[in-house]
Amino acid sequence: MIYLSKEALESEEVVDFKRKLELTWIGKENRPQLEPRILLEDSEKSHHAQHRVTPYDVFDNRLIFGDNLLALKALEQEFAGKISCVYIDPPFNTQQAFEHYDDGVEHSVWLALMRDRLEILHRLLHPTGSLFVQIDDTELAYLIAVADEIFGRKNRVSVITFKQSSASGPKSVNPGLVTTSNFIVYYAKNKDVWKSYKVFVPTARDDRYSKYIENFDAPFTEWRLINLKEAFCTFHQATWKDLKQRFTDRLENKLEEFVLSNPDRVVRTARVAPRDVNAEARDALSASLQDSDTVFRTERVGKESYYFLNGEQLLFYRSKTRLINTKLTTASAATNLWDDVLSNNLHNEGGVAFPNGKKPEFLLKRIIELSTEPGDIILDSFAGSGTTGAVGHKMGRRWIMVELGEHCHTHILPRLRRVVDGTDFSGITGAVGWKGGGGFRYYLLAPSLLEKDKWGNWVISKQYNSAMLAEALCKLEGFVYAPSDTIYWQHGHSTERDFVYVTTQNLSPDQLQQLSDEVGSDRSLLVLCTAFRGKADRWANLTVKKIPRAVLSRCEWGHDDYSLSVENLPKAPAKPGQQSLFEEEVD
Ligand SMILES: C[S@@+](CC[C@H](N)C(=O)[O-])C[C@H]1O[C@@H](n2cnc3c(N)ncnc32)[C@H](O)[C@@H]1O
């Protein structure tokens, strides 16, 4: 035990020591004030099947073209707490962007980029949801430190090692170890309520199951057990030696095929402690010791019966199997080592070439199976070639993807169109029996709501029409955009009785009086207009504000790119007083 003196306890080091454990980096304290943009559908690029294929077809999936930080912010109002699974595979590819900067700066930008995105992703996740981040070993440790701060260390479920290549080819001659794996960091939003589903993976045949019930159709008390090999030879009407010659290196496969065709007849016996079974089973167990070579059975309500033979439990090969990709397979529960999802044909999956980035469809299938059920929403904000959406779509999940690169159009759009049309036969299509159907909508991020005029003043962007303006202001003010067909001043609502009206008019006192009369005493209305005359507080049921002044200080305007680049180096915090100009309310 170490005892510290009073002086030592008050020293700076100890004060530091008492602070929470955290990773720091240049500019960590700076957070972007993101503009919650609206999303604009380009229906030319959206795509839907001609007709329903199943009653469960999903049509409202979303593909968003643009920077993912702005896109995630745009999704927040509608999707906070609704996403069941987030999978991201962020790049760490700075190319030449940072050649004149210290390594520390590059890493700082990357960490800030990840922190800002992970914070919104955390808010988007459903309380029972899960996050998966695929990452290589260069950033793994830092990513975990950042994600632990946001998700909480206790919600870190696992770090999965994914074997993505083998130690062959040119990389195997380089000095040092050959890198064949990367990692998937897996978090629960909240482990106390988190939902995860059991996933099984194919394993080798269990050769401890070496007996075969020769007369399976007879009553179980008369069952006779013979050796598995003997049964296999009888089935092929040949000796073991002949079969070895006939099947050569396929012999084990053939034997496994035979076992999997007879999962209820291939058995083994195993010791069982009497205290591990119920009283009735204990009696059957001891009776089986007395009466050798006779099978005893104890039935259980809602569970598989127990079978005993010669004082041991009789176990059936079926218990070692699962239906994986529609085939009965020897299987065991998935571990945190995933070395069985190598894709031989990865470059052809989805019909798009995306070297060094594309992940196997079977990898995404496992992640989606682990964390969701059909109908749940999955999100990938670093979509690349669109693997997550393609796999989610084929598995009946709803999906949202965001991609900034031009391959959103050259790769994701054609890939997802083929999935919808049922003409993508690659990846998991056969394994899940995908036939096509459903659809998706393609969105762009709207431009910034405000732009500077020639005098340097912030004004409403000329690219906004009145519907866009109303929708954008609803989002900024926290209202649900739902314009009424009949009541011109109802553009959105926050509750059943609280509405918002957006107009570029200069409202006169008479117009405001008329609005107040129509709203009545049991409802309230926020009026956002470019100008008005009269005193703002004259009408008890109206709150009148001028745009854009009312929203100027809310966020950073005109900022379109939050991606990993030098321009996005951490900004110095605003000097005190700099924003007060905007905050001033002038009538
Ligand atoms: C490694 S790839 C993802 C590959 C994907 N998992 C697949 O299977 O195809 C990373 C992707 O993130 C995209 N990206 C990087 N920064 C982004 C940002 N700020 N917003 C949106 N996408 C971004 C890149 O353009 C790239 O396509």
Image (cartoon, rainbow, N blue to C red):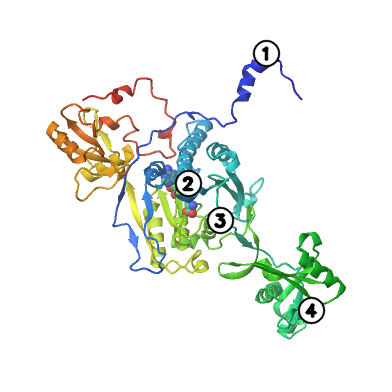
Q: Residue furthest top?
A: 7
Question: What residue is pinned by disc 3?
Answer: 370
Q: Is residue 8 left or right of residue 541?
A: right
Question: Residue flagged by tag 4: what amino acid is it?
Answer: Ile
Question: Residue flagged by tag 3: what amino acid is it?
Answer: Leu
Question: What residue is pinned by disc 2?
Answer: 125
Q: Give the mark nearer the N terminus: 4 vs 2.
A: 2
Residue in the foreground of this view, choosing between 346 and 375: 375
Query: Residue 538 at x, y = what percent?
Result: 20, 28
Residue 473 position by quadrant? top left
Q: CA distance from mark 3 to mark 2?
A: 15 Å
Question: What residue is pinned by disc 4?
Answer: 226
Question: What residue is pinned by disc 1?
Answer: 7
Q: Give the mark nearer the N terminus: 1 vs 2.
A: 1
Residue in the foreground of this view, choosing between 504 and 114: 504
Q: CA distance from mark 3 to mark 4?
A: 39 Å
Q: Residue furthest right?
A: 290
**Mark 3 vs 2: CB contact within 8 A:** no
For the question of whether residue 354 can be seen, the reply is: no
